[in-house]
Amino acid sequence: MTRPILPRVNFFDGQEVTETDLDVEQEAWNETVANAVDLVAGSGIEKEFSTQAVLFDSSSVPASVQTLITTQNFDGEPIFPADSFSQVIFTQPSNTSEGSQLEVEISGSTLDGTPSLKVYIFGLIFGGAFVQEVLKFEVNESQITRNYFTQIVSFMTQDFRGNQNTTITGVASLNSGGRLRILESLPMTLERDVIMAEQASEPNMDYVNFKPATLSKTLDILLDEIADTESLNEDDLKINVTATRTRELPPNDSTGLIIGQKFQATTNNLQKVSMLLSVSENTLALPGEEFDWSGDIVVGIRKLQTTTTCPTDTVPGTDIEFDQSQLH
């Protein structure tokens, strides 16, 4: 940090001292004292290390990984702590008991909001749970993970340095270029975590149309490989790319059918509720109109009751088990 040298008054004998002279002298003195305190005591935030720990840097990798980048086969390939030649690819968080939040930095990529780049991190967190976290980048920036990782098992990317897989969507994973770094986040670093609660498991849209680098492998095979390296269970990741159940709203329904999903919020300040809907193909429609739809869908949010509707009903053991109120 550069500290400016403030001007001071060069006093001499017999000088007429003005109020401006005193102000300049006082400002210089106060700034000098403040700089001295900051230099000795710091900002009040104690750093664990003099420099931020870099766990992975795509600009400094072994030859095996550099080959994946050069040949555009990096995206969709699990990256492990070491390659088959025992060359270190990335190091682990320093806090192996409580875990560390990770800072993922994308720089130099040709991102302008469309398309987006994704980084998939698989690892262990406090308590030993095997989890996954996806960070989505639409611009060059740094993002902080929600989870505190004690160990990084593997990570993958999509639309970062590209691959050759055109079998999923007809288009290969894009080469946005740039540099990827994974670091340990610094103390008192602000993170962007605006979602209080979400249900994104069925389906998990971050993994839909995932493009493995190896054409003979599927997403399930890759997840199995990642889990097997540490004798973990892929099912713990709770990744589902297809819905396990579909519910149909028949057209012009006159029975008053209501389809609902309970969720329990920790606040009454709901900013947004998202739903995923689709339209069944009308095979009798004219060409180009097979998926046309018109009409209204009424969406309402109803509070859960705190008492049973009938005095003889069994009282639920948890709040989420109560029926919804009849009032919106």
Image: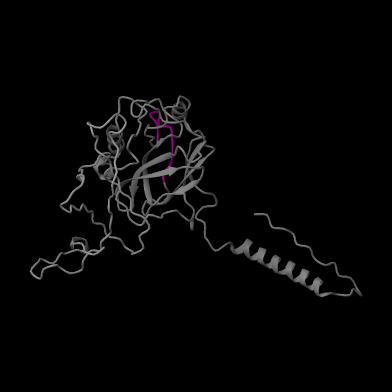
Tell me: 24 left or right of 158. right
On the rendered image, what quadrant is the N terminus found in?
bottom right
Residue 29 magenta-highlighted: no
How many numbered tags mark residues here?
Answer: 0
Q: Residue at (74%, 71%) from the top-left corner?
A: 26
Q: Residue 261 or 228: which is nearer the viewer?
A: 261
Judging from the image, the colouring scheme is one colour
Tell me: 58 left or right of 15. left
Check the image and name the residue furthest to the right.
14
Indicate the position of residue 240 as horizontal and vertical percent values. Answer: 26, 41
Indicate the position of residue 186 as horizontal and vertical percent values. Answer: 49, 53
Q: Residue at (51%, 42%) from the top-left corner?
A: 140
Indicate the position of residue 265 as horizontal and vertical percent values. Answer: 30, 60
**Hey, which quadrant is residue 209 in on the image?**
top left
The kind of secondary structure the magenta stretch mainly shows is loop
Check the image and name the residue furthest to the left.
312
Residue 83 magenta-highlighted: yes
Q: Residue 172 or 22: which is nearer the viewer?
A: 172
On the rendered image, what quadrant is the C terminus found in?
bottom left
Q: Which residues are magenta?
A: 82-92
Rendered view: 244 above or below 163: below
Tell me: 37 left or right of 305. right
**Hey, which quadrant is residue 98 in on the image?**
bottom left
Check the image and name the residue furthest to the front.
286
Indicate the position of residue 315 as horizontal and vertical percent values. Answer: 13, 67
Tell me: 5 left or right of 232. right
